[in-house]
Image (spheres, rainbow, N blue to C red):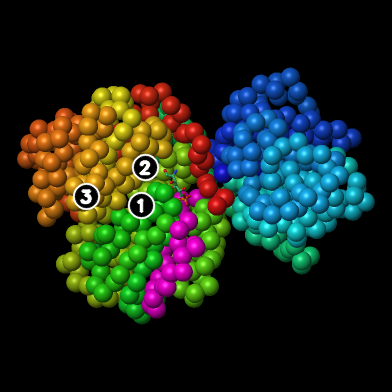
Amino acid sequence: MCGIVGYVGNKNAQDFLISGLKRLEYRGYDSAGIVTLDDAGEATLLRAKGKIVNLEEKLAENKREDKIGIGHTRWATHGEPSETNAHPHQAGDIYLVHNGIIENYKELKEHLTEHEFKSQTDSEVLAALVESFYGGGEYSLVDAVVQALKLVKGTYGIAVISRLNPHEIVVARSGSPLVIGVGHDETLIASDASALVGHTKQAIYLNDGEVALVTSHSVEIKTLNAEPVSAKVEEIETNLAAIQKGGYEHFLLKEIMEQPESLRETLRGRVNATEGTVRLGGPGLTEAQLRKIKHLVIVGCGTAYHAGLMAGYYIEQFTPEITIETVIASEYRYRNAYIPKDSVALIVSQSGETADTLACLREIKKQGVPTIGIVNAIGSTIAREVDGGTYVHVGPEISVASTKAFTSQMIAMVMFGLTIAQAKGVKPSVLRPYVQEIAKLPEVVKETLASVSAEVREVAAKYAEYDHAIYLGRDTAYPAAMEGALKLKEISYVDANAYAFGELKHGPLALVDDRFFEVALLPSGELYDKAVSNVQEVLARGGHILAITNVDRFDLPVENVVKITTELKIFAPVIMNLVMQLLAYYVTVAKGYNVDQPRNLAKSVTVE
Ligand code: M6R
């Protein structure tokens, strides 16, 4: 959701702001803007609707040598995507960029009668509020920001500059991330460390309720209550290659293809295939605590939720006396849900910044339930606020559609389940097949991606004609089907929904006609024959079925079949998910849509 950048130093600010915004474009891409100040405080404000390239066109005619500035890429919340609603917003001498939502903006606006509002945004209200406390420079910028923020309800990450002091930036956060990059004779600001990669490796992650006064040589942090905070400088681990396309046409394809390596990173040092055991250090629970767990709450949104659902199906297969509830964070945060004693909550998030997931984490912590993060982004808010955690270590995921994170989140949660089962004394003979298949996954994923890609591409060309799809699965293949449908719908705009095979005749079967195609997941196992009967029901009604199966003897007269390896039995649905990722990718390419930045969406959903 929206991206913020800022620069103060001895280099060209516009250059950093534009390159930083490009790196953050995946976070919001409906409009963008930058403002820079020269030494005398003269401002150059450039804003454009649409992608950063539109802003670059304006920049070409407005090149400056200014050494300080702030910038923003927007994902609209209040007010349509337009140049006027794009940030930075100006109020008097002040320019401000904002991520988040000011909930009481209407109430605040009523009192800001001296400012002539130009946009429909809540962010301009914040700019005007800061200006009202600034008093034309009578008070310091940082004090004006603090006074303004004390009146604000909602979430924010902000960067503010003033024409009256073109050597400092004030930044603050509450619920929306902000990172300060410490360089040589320069300080850089970003809402995501990826914008800083290649400029500095040293970063300070601001905490909620903190405000920082930043110059080219200093960073002074305090709380809104004026308590000084000593800055903790941390190392940025990401490298340039990880945030570039590396020869692929789209980040999505790169990230799908990276899964052998990303899975290897998830498993590294955690799996002993010979002994059939797993060991996770991060959760920080003792054997006795693990033994006592009777209930797991798994919380996430979108793909993270699906990963949690699928992991839940697996964990209950091998863990005795445990109940598992996988919940959608945006719902759970407002439910009056009772969490039984001896529960542990798994908080699942690629970005570690998703507002609803973070809110659930905070609610659950209030109930005294231990929280374990299943997070990718190192140093993210969720990663820092959970009691313990397992990083999935898949590296930056840039494409809005989540792929490699799903696979690793799911497996990381199954490994957590295995550690519970081990502690509860489940026989090694029960657990070993799971561990052994997990250990094989990176290699099998590699072979599968190499062997099925061309075939899926061909199949996708046939289904790119359709606007409706039904994904079907049973047991662990059901959440896999849900994830497959989400992937297709979010990037190709095909109206794709998933159903449990057994639910078909309770309603969805009525949909089957020539406008729809059906993706049927048919893994081998106890429920295979039942799923085959369901496929027959669809065939009998003229369904256009694409089957994905690991069953050699599969001979149903469906339109298309993608056969996957028979090497994995338990985790065959994970492999089927790769096929569905590729299907979504190739259908979208065939339809000619923007694969990495689908309309209306943004990568990290830091607003409610
Ligand atoms: O960063 P998170 O894992 O918390 O994000 C959760 C969802 O917003 C995310 O998975 C979303 O559904 C993806 N666009 C799906 O591909």
User: As displayed, is residue 257 above or below residue 126?
Assistant: above
Residue 497's spot in the image, x, y percent? Answer: 32, 42
Per the rendered image, the range of residues in magenta is 330-351
Between circles 3 and 2, the one closer to the viewer is 3
Query: Disc 3 on helix, strand or loop?
Result: helix
When asked about the image quadrant of residue 54, the answer is top right
Residue 591's spot in the image, x, y percent? Answer: 38, 24
Q: Amino acid at mark 1?
A: His
Residue in front for this viewpoint, 4 or 447: 4
Is 567 placed left or right of 290 in the picture?
left
Q: Mark 2 vs mark 1: which is more N-terminal?
A: 1
When asked about the image quadrant of residue 546, the answer is top left
Q: Amino acid at mark 2?
A: Leu
What distance separates the C-alpha of mark 2 from that of mark 1?
9 Å
What distance separates the C-alpha of mark 3 from that of mark 2?
22 Å
Residue ID for mark 3? 506
- The disc label shown at residue 306, or none: 1
- The disc label shown at residue 486, or none: 2
Query: Disc 2 on helix, strand or loop?
Result: helix
Residue 333's spot in the image, x, y percent? Answer: 49, 62
User: As displayed, is residue 360 above or below residue 508?
Assistant: below
Asked whether the residues under the numbered discs 2 and 1 touch, taking CB atoms below 8 Å apart as contact, a structural biologist would say yes
- The disc label shown at residue 585, or none: none
Mark 1 beta carbon near ligand 1 (under 8 Å) = no
Q: Is residue 346 magenta?
A: yes
Is 279 placed left or right of 560 in the picture?
right
Q: Mark 3 vs mark 2: which is more N-terminal?
A: 2
Is 163 placed left or right of 9 in the picture?
right
